[in-house]
Image: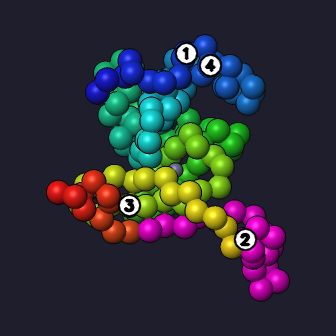
Amino acid sequence: MVIDSIPISMEKILQILKEKGIRVTHQRLAVYKVLCKENNHLTAEEIYEQIKPDNPVVSLATVYTILDIFKGKGLVNEIRIHFDKSCFETRVDQHHHFSCKQCGLIFDVDMKFCQGLKNKEVQGHAIESMQGYFYGTCRRCRKS
Ligand SMILES: [Zn+2]
Ligand SMILES: [Zn+2]
């Protein structure tokens, strides 16, 4: 795993955590850093596996706790595209997801919202959040 190719600097991560009022610890930094890698939608287990080599004392329970804190502060988005386990990402604006049944990757999907969703109302119900999940074969797997 090439952790050095992250498109975000450590200073930037520190700044983001501080702006959200999150106390900075080595493990919290490590979790956020892994999630910042491009196109990453990771489960707590995957995050744990990636940070463990540099954080030998970290536990999976700690990773869950950190993700909870991040979620509470609006720093990460939790998606349930795989029903049995949550995935986390640092992109927190409204967007949808596509899951490839062949390679298992999850892609961000940007679509125009219909009028009802723009008004944040559907049949009299007020919408606070929404997530659309699509399943199929991704463009790369379709070619091969
Ligand atoms: Zn695929
Ligand atoms: Zn996403």
- Would residue 125 be found to the left or right of residue 50 on screen? right
Does mark 2 have its CB less than 8 Å from ligand 2? Answer: no
Amino acid found under the numbered disc labelled 3: Ser
State the mark number for residue 99.
Answer: 3
Distance from the alpha carbon under mark 3 to that under mark 1: 30 Å
Point out the image quarter for the C terminus.
bottom left
Residue denoted by label 2: 117
Crowding near the residue tagged with mark 1, few <14, some 14–19, many ≥20 C-alpha atoms within 10 Å: few
- Residue 91 lies, in percent from the top left, at 58, 43
State the mark number for residue 10.
Answer: 1
Between marks 4 and 2 in the image, the one whose residue lies nearer the viewer = 2
Q: Secondary structure at mark 2?
A: helix
Does mark 4 have its CB less than 8 Å from ligand 2? Answer: no
Please report the residue visible at 73 percent of the width from the left and 30 percent of the height from the top.
20
Amino acid found under the numbered disc labelled 4: Lys
Q: Are marks 1 and 4 in contact (CB under 8 Å)?
A: yes
Amino acid found under the numbered disc labelled 1: Met
